[in-house]
């Protein structure tokens, strides 16, 4: 995924009200950017750190920039939670995620039961629902999800269990937007219920695919699949 417009460089002043961040651009101008990440952003917030923003032309938008990434530990961490969904859709369509190849029809935002899943794919042999989550939390060598309690995420897992019960393939795809981690795991201390349901889902046949993204100011690409521990 290449950014359609050149990103704008600056430094983080502060993030506040979950969805807003004040940024000082290189020319000294201070702007407010939209932050799509509603979580705590623990381990990927550092005042004064380098950031990149994407400019927005929509006259209806109060903020004229979207916060895309922040530099932590000498590497870029993607914090735009909308990007993983696009990355996943494009990759499944292009057959570039190992284990998720061979689908002839791919669609975004498809409902099953009381949940709406990010990607639906099918071919003549099977149907598949894929839920995509953005991962930015780091602890040691671990990439963890979630970074805040997520009842919505718990509901998605329970619905994926129902998907599997009906004989349909069900996949949790975790897109890890940082390169300084080696293993994926649920954040048991933050959301023990999510961790419990994820283990139940896995035992029920729901597949877990943690895939690392390579984040740069030019674009974001999916890389290698990481191991996971439950």
Image (cartoon, rainbow, N blue to C red):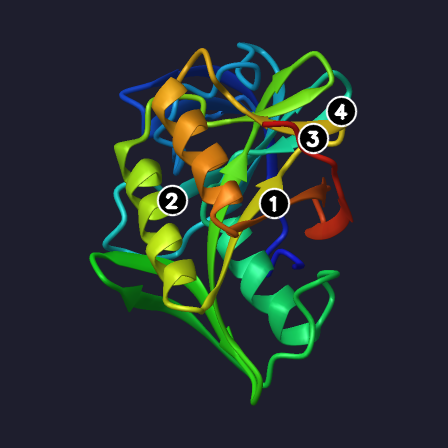
Image point 51% across, 40% down: which residue? Answer: 134
**Quick one: SS at disc 4?**
loop
Disc marking residue 180: 4
Q: In the rendered view, does 177 fall on the left or right side of 201?
A: right
Per the image, the residue denoted by label 1 is 7
Residue 31 shows up from this direction? no
Q: Residue at x 72, y 28 (%)?
A: 183
Q: Foreground residue, 126 or 2?
A: 126
Q: Nearer the viewer, mark 1 or mark 3?
A: 3
Q: Of residues 81 and 92, which is closer to you in this image? A: 92
Provide the secondary structure element on which disc 1 rests.
Answer: loop
Indicate which disc, 2 or 1, sits on the residue closer to the N terminus. Answer: 1
How far is mark 4 from mark 2, CA to CA? Answer: 27 Å
Q: Which mark is residue 76?
A: 3
- What's the residue at 62%, 16% (across, down)? 49
Location of residue 10 with respect to 158 vertically, above or below: above
Rendered image: mark on residue 157:
2
Badge 4 density bin: few <14, some 14–19, many ≥20, Cα 10 Å: many
Label count reads: 4
Q: CA distance from mark 2 to mark 1?
A: 35 Å
| x, y percent for residue 222 | 71, 52
């Amino acid at each position: 995924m290449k950014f359609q417009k050149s990103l704008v460089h600056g430094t983080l002043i502060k993030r506040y009200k979950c969805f807003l961040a004040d940024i000082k651009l290189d020319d000294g101008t201070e702007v407010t950017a939209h932050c799509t990440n509603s979580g705590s952003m623990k381990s990927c917030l550092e005042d004064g750190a380098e950031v990149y923003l994407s400019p927005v032309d929509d006259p209806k938008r109060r903020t004229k920039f979207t916060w895309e990434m922040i530099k932590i530990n000498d590497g870029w961490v993607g914090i735009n939670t909308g990007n993983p969904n696009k990355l996943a859709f494009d990759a499944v369509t292009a057959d570039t995620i190992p284990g998720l190849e061979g689908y002839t029809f791919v669609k975004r935002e498809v409902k099953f039961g009381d949940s709406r899943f990010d990607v639906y794919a099918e071919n003549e042999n099977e149907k598949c629902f894929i839920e995509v989550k953005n991962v930015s939390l780091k602890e040691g060598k671990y990439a963890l999800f979630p970074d805040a309690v997520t009842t919505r995420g718990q509901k998605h897992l329970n619905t994926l269990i129902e998907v599997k019960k009906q004989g349909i393939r069900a996949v949790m795809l975790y897109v890890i937007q940082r390169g300084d981690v080696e293993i994926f795991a649920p954040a048991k201390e933050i959301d023990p219920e999510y961790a419990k349901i994820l283990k139940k889902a896995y035992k029920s046949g729901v597949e877990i695919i943690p895939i690392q993204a390579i984040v740069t100011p030019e674009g974001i690409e999916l890389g290698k699949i990481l191991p996971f521990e439950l």
